[in-house]
Amino acid sequence: MKFNTDDMECPTFLDEYEKLVFRMTIPRVMIDNASCSNATLVKIDSARKHGILLEAVQVLTDLNLSIKKAYVSCDGRWFMDVFHVTDLDGNKLTDKRFISCIEQSLGTIHYASSKSYNGLTALELTGTDRIGLLSEVFAVLSDLHCNVVEAKMWTHNGRIASLIHIKESQSGYPIEDSQKIDRIEARLKSVLKGDNDVWSAKTSVSLAVTHTERRLHQMMLADRDYERQPVIRTSHDTPIVSVLNCLEKGYSVVNIQCKDRIKLLFDVVCTLTDMQYVVFHATINSAGDRAYLEFFIRHTDGIPISSDAEKQRVILCLQAAIKRRASEGVRLELSTGDKQGLLADVTRTFRENGLNVTRAEISTTGDSALNIFYITDVRGNPVDSNIIESVRGEIGWSNLKVKELPLINHQTVDREESAVGVGGAMLLSLGSIFRRNLYSLGLIKSFS
């Protein structure tokens, strides 16, 4: 079954010239369920602009789709992207309403906005991570009568970044009182500074709407977490990243080999985009639990990577981007009724039992709260099961549950589309990538 956006209506308020521009710039989207037996193909043909690939990947990621393979190619002023996607259980997409939602979302990415946090105040926090820091942050917000509606927190290499959306606990309105905002900033900055982080701790308050996970990447990139050393035990599965220059074509070629996981492509493309690189061609593939990504890039000024120092920075930044979301520790899910001080109480219990929160996702819907925490012991090691059971007893057996990490559902990879990348894998030529994309878009009959 195929769908396309060729006859998408132009907004009625546009004049004829604006309608022409609208039709020239709106992406052409096709959803193909016939060409591949184990994935749905999402094909996008759009005018090239900086960030367009990230916007497409962001839409697919926000819709909870798993990207199994992808081919990206630029022909002059146009991009042609093909994504092989499934749901998180590894199934093809069959729901017509959901397919229509994908179409509409991708067809309007030039004009789309991020998830709306209207009516909320956004707090941005960066600083040195330590045991119990999250508990102190939530205790301050509770004491200042702030309700946490949504929040995400990442840690990497001893640094923490968090984006927290709050509102007044009594009125339910965003916090606009400048004196209260100043008090929130001052107290949170004091918490983040602790005894050792006088200079690098940062807090900011705004009403701006932004994509939370992209903003977290930007905050940690600006904090230069990629230059720091881990302070607790982390996974030994370090991503392998290499950067070579393809001088005859004027590109830098970035190859990545790492463990596959949800949102991997978003994290990599987000970082390349925020570092002001443009992806002209790319191949993404997976085999077993491994992912292989290859990008042909240039800086936004049209120049490939020109120095060893720049190459090393790209390698370190991409490794950091992949590892920030790597789920260290046990996943605990807290599902209960929302109430004032809930997060302060729960995270205090973690701290008192010597548990370290490496990542957190906080969400509320009406009077219900669903909070996800990834925890380790103080050294970054797995937590003793007896301690977990003790914590569950304190918080509530039925409320706090241990959840397995979601597994990537992998299909058998065809030999002709075997993985590419470093470590002995074959480097696809630029011509091969371009022909493969034309084939996937149905513009040629064979890419052999």
Image (spheres, rainbow, N blue to C red):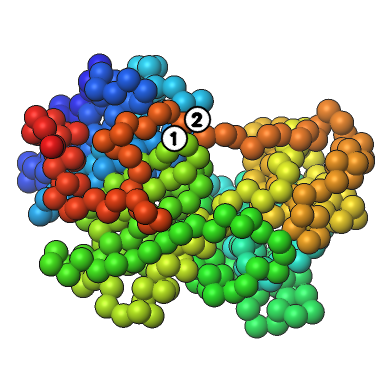
Q: Are marks 2 and 1 in contact (CB under 8 Å)?
A: yes
Q: Relative to 121, is 299 on the left or the right?
A: left
Q: Earlier in the sequence, mark 2 or mark 1?
A: 1
Q: Nearer the viewer, residue 272 or 411?
A: 411
Task: Judge whether 80 appears above or below 377 on screen.
Answer: above
Which amino acid does the dot numbered 2 rest on? Asn
Residue 221 shows up from this direction: yes
* Residue 55 position within the rendered picture, expressed as x and y whole percent measured from the top left: 34, 48
Position above or below: 154 against 440:
below
Q: Is residue 168 left or right of residue 390?
A: left
In the figure, residue 157 lies in which quadrant?
bottom right
Residue for point 64% across, 41% down = 363
Residue 253 horizontal/vertical position (percent): 28, 62
- Relative to 311, is 161 above or below? above
Residue 263 visible in this rendered orientation of the protein:
no
Front in this rendered view, residue 265 or 125:
265
Number of residues whose C-alpha sits closer than 10 Å to that of mark 1, classed few (under 14), some (14–19) or many (20 or more): many
| Farthest bottom residue in view | 199
Q: Which residue is mark 2?
A: 409
Numbered badge on residue 66: 1
Numbered tag placed on residue 346 in the rendering? none
At label 1, the amino acid type is: Ser
Quadrant of the rendering where the N terminus is positioned: top left
